Image (cartoon, rainbow, N blue to C red):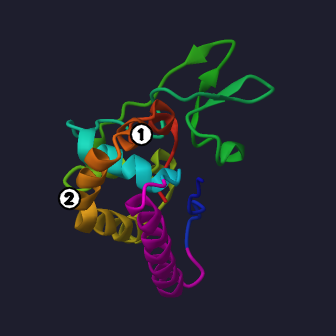
Amino acid sequence: IYWQMENCPSFNNSDKYINQYKEDIERLFNYWLSFLRIGVFLNFVPFITAISRYLYEKEIPKQYYCGYGYSMIYIQTQGKCYACCDSVESNIHLIGDIHNGISFPIIDLTQTICGKCQYVKICGGRCGRMHKEFTPNHINEYCEINKTMYSLIETVLPEIKELIIKFPEYNQKINNPIFAYTEYTA
């Protein structure tokens, strides 16, 4: 199961949205964890991928995990190529076309507002498009929401490590390579 927050330039009522999301994500995480504890591994992508990054990601990423600006190319039917599939009508993410080639933007995630964040290894900057289009305040609103999920995981990470030992098949599921290519962050 995979979900993501809509990347919108602003929330109608940010406090209400953030508080409701935090409450919902905590309930969902506890539901997921209750199954994990009894030997049932539910494939909830955001939790699994974050845990994988907590356990196995060693380096601070220099590029966005979603592939923005280095590995993903979105090609429109007329041949224009974009670094992101959102907002193509504005050409903000235009990186070239199939006739003349493409040029990826130079991105160093460590030089963004995420560069010094303790969670950058986990979220990978969340979304390249967001960094190009949104205000720093709105980016921080998304970060606040994501940090809720990360703190939930951190509190039970020792237990999750024990569960991986108890249920060795969990390790393979957590390391499923398809999740590395999923824009996972809730």
Classify mark 1: residues with Cα within 10 Å, few (<14), some (14-19) or many (20+). Answer: many
Magenta-colored span: 11-40
**Residue nearest the viewer, comparing 146 with 36:** 36
Chain-order first, disc 1 or disc 2: 1
Residue at (47%, 86%) from the top-left corner? Answer: 15
Q: Is residue 58 visible?
A: yes
For label 2, the crowd category at 10 Å Cα-Cα, with few meaning under 14, some 14 to 19 and many 20 or more, is: few
The amino acid type found where label 1 is placed reads Tyr
Give the residue pinned by disc 2: 158
Task: Left or right? Give the position of 64 relative to 73.
Answer: left
Disc 1 + disc 2, Cβ < 8 Å = no
32 in magenta: yes
Give residue 141's position: percent from left, percent from top: 41, 71
Q: Image check: 81 left or right of 131?
A: right
Q: Amino acid at mark 2?
A: Pro
Say what secondary structure mark 1 lies in.
loop
Residue found at x 34% / y 51%? 51
| Magenta highlight on residue 68 | no
Residue drawn at x 43%, y 55% is: 39
Which secondary structure is most common in the magenta stretch?
Answer: helix
What x and y, as percent, mark residue 133? 51, 55
Residue 89: image quadrant is top right
Visible residue check, residue 110: no
Instruction: Tell me: residue 12, above or below residue 30.
Output: below
Q: Is residue 80 left or right of residue 125?
A: right
Q: Observer-nearest residue: 134 or 54?
A: 54
Image coords of residue 109 (percent x, y): 30, 42
Residue 119, percent from left and from top: 26, 55
Label number found at residue 65? 1
Per the model, the C-alpha gap separating discs 1 and 2 is: 25 Å
Tag on residue 55? none
